[in-house]
């Protein structure tokens, strides 16, 4: 994942986003950094506050 400035459109505003090597752009509000490998290529798991890393497979939760 590469951090890209001004790549995510929010109305008339632009915000930073993560861009994968295949060119997909991810909203930083929908992804979290994996504590295991540091990748931001994560997806929300069905459980509230839970995420899974698409790189290493680590499942983790974000505390309140």
Image (spheres, rainbow, N blue to C red):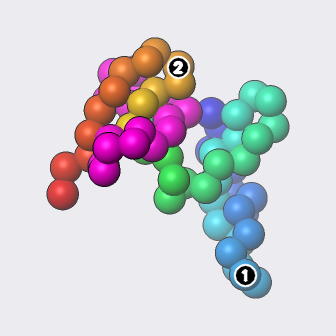
Residue, far top: 56
Q: Residue 42: horizontal and vertical position, in percent?
A: 50, 35
Question: Residue at (39%, 42%) from the top-left corner?
Answer: 46
Q: Is residue 55 above or below residue 30?
A: above
Which numbered dot is residue 55? 2
Question: Residue at (49%, 46%) from the top-left corner?
Answer: 31
Q: Where, by quadrant of the figure, is residue 59 drawn?
A: top left
Q: Where, by quadrant of the figure, is residue 38 drawn?
A: top left
Mark 1 or 2 closer to N-term? 1
Quadrant location of the C terminus in the rendered image: bottom left
Marks 1 and 2, how far apart at CA? 31 Å
Q: Residue 53: horizontal and vertical position, in percent?
A: 46, 27
Q: Is residue 26 magenta?
A: no
Q: Where, by quadrant of the figure, is residue 61 drawn?
A: top left
Question: Residue at (72%, 81%) from the top-left corner?
Answer: 11
Nearer to the camera, 48 or 8: 48
């Amino acid at each position: 994942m590469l951090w890209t400035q001004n790549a995510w459109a929010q109305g008339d505003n632009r915000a930073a986003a993560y861009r994968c090597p295949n060119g997909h752009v991810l909203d930083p509000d929908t992804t979290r950094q994996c504590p295991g490998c540091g990748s931001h290529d994560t997806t929300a798991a069905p459980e509230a506050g839970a995420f899974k890393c698409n790189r290493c497979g680590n499942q983790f939760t974000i505390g309140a």
